Amino acid sequence: MDKIISGKNISLTDEGFLKDFAQWDKDIADALAAENQIVLTPRHWEVLTYIQNEFKNDVPLSIRKIGKSGIVDIKEFYQLFPVAPLKTATKIAGVPKPVSCI
Amino acid sequence: MHYKVLKMKRLVILGAGTGGTIMANHLKKELDDKKWGITIVDGRKQHYYQPGFLFIPFDQYKPEDVVKPIQQFIPEGVDFVNISVDKINAAQHQVVLANGNTLLYDILIIATGSEIAPDETEGMQGDEWGKSVFTFYDFEGAIALRDKLKNWQGGKLVVHITEMPIKCPVAPLEFAFLADSFFKDKGMRDKVEITYVTPLSGAFTKPKTTETLNYLLKEKNIHIKTDFAIESVDNDNKQILDYGGKSVPFDLLVTVPTNKGSQVIENSGLGDELNFVPTDKATLQSKVHPDIFVLGDATNVPTSKAGSVVHFEAEILTENILTYIKGQKLEEEFDGHANCFIETGGGKALLIDFNYDHEPVTGTFPIAGIGPLRLLKESRFNHYGKLAFKWVYWNMLLKARPIPFVKARMSIAGKDYN
């Protein structure tokens, strides 16, 4: 499905994840964060940048891994993205949702 | 007459599990034994058929079905060093053994696998470990769970994944399906409530499998809790707690603990946070040193940690090592191919076939349009395929004998991608 986000036509999956990371920019992140009742602070951005770098390196993400990243601990990760943090943070970062093989 | 003294070069394989053993068999055939010596190092005596662990708790496989001596699968002419590894000194091209001896290598293959680390989760190995908290992800755990299930009177069964990635990502779901059948057969399904708890957003996370397979959970009356990131096991109140404040009570917890790469990787400073080695996902050359290659569960490549994957990787890696020896650019590319049977209970199974770029879909396998196996569809035939695979594993796969029709690179023919 396509949706206008911050004035741009963006392709999204049924669950609202960007289909193409190339379409992502910071305005879109702000808009997606707002939909999840989050206002992005510099701490959020540190986490989002980490997630994007791991994605670019093909490294699978998990909450524990983010907790061990040295950027945030898991408690703070939950404070920053209170509901289903990994799903919400990956969505805002514009990367695919973490998946299993099936 | 000139005599040229050739110094033997040495290829060392760490780990004699599925990947290391297959590589030893491939390379013994391919390398010139006047120029190359092959050594495989593993401190264990036993080789486990790990897919069989799933069936032990339900007494469908006996423990002796899944274990054979490691030595039996090491080809003649390959040195088997039956000592644990302490660490790799990548800069010195050297492996240090637990007894302090060292092995020099010209090429190193890391096949040290992954293992469970229940100590990563607070309380997992508390008072209830082995009483109401179990795992079937190792041999001893699977046997202990079998003994527990024999006399269990029912209650809340929670099947749980701690965090991804895990070895054989479908196994916990298969466990839940087989448990449903097991308790039905015992005439006590009404006494057992089965809940599947996952850190992901669903039991199925890919669009096609979600669409095609979600009926299984409903049909088998398996409850699901998603997005659950476990913080601890509360032994006193028999519940698992999540970082976000959620809790799930259990009478019997069957958990898949955190999976980590080997301690050797951590000792060597070659891994990521979970001791998996950064590896080029196409060539399987490590990103840490050009003379180190990695395959199987030990890598961080974004495909499943599974025997079928390591089997396909081994073919590609063998070609790449021969190319590397010639000093040429590595050209063989692994596509992430995996091919797995999934038990769904009641004597049926599914088959999935996928790679880095293509999710599992419906269709026919291995021959397009004919099969005889059907992808993403339950059948008895698939179940027999899964059971037959144990024989294939011991007799063909470990010995690197070609398996008819099944290719390292995935074919998209006969599959329904639209």
Image (cartoon, rainbow, N blue to C red):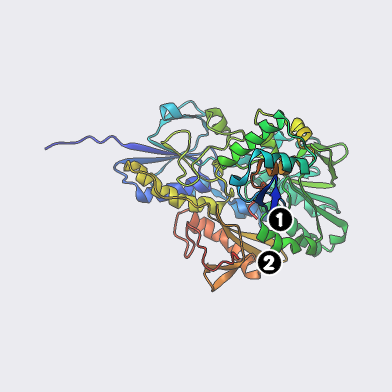
Toward the front, the furthest residue is A7
Quarter occupied by residue B181? bottom right
In the depicted view, which residue is nearer to us: B315 or B137?
A: B315
Q: Residue at x 69, y 64 (%)?
A: B212
In the rendered image, is residue B163 in sight?
Answer: no
Q: Nearer the viewer, mark 1 or mark 2?
A: 1
| Above or below: residue B102 compared with residue B254 | above
Toward the left, the furthest residue is B1
- Which element type, helix, strand or loop, lies under badge 1? loop
Q: Residue at x 71, y 29 (%)?
A: A43
Q: Residue at x 56, y 66 (%)?
A: B415
- Which element type, helix, strand or loop, lies under badge 2? strand
- Marks 2 and 1: in contact by CB < 8 Å? no
Find disc 2 in the rendering and name its residue.
B348
Q: Residue at x 44, y 60 (%)?
A: B402
Instruction: Decide if residue B233 is on the left or right side of residue A28.
Output: right
Q: Position of residue B100 (x, y in %)?
A: 48, 25
Chain ID for label 2? B
Q: Specify the quadrant that holds the N terminus of chain A.
A: bottom right
The alpha-carbon separation of the residues under discs 1 and 2 comes to 31 Å
Q: Residues within 10 Å of mark 2 (few under 14, many from 20)?
A: some
In the rendered image, is residue A78 in sight?
Answer: yes
Q: Position of residue B66 (x, y in %)?
A: 60, 53
- Say which amino acid is labelled 2: Lys
Q: Specify the quadrant that holds the C terminus of chain A.
A: bottom right
Find disc 1 in the rendering and name its residue.
A14
In the depicted view, which residue is nearer to us: A69 or B292?
A: A69
Q: How many marks?
A: 2
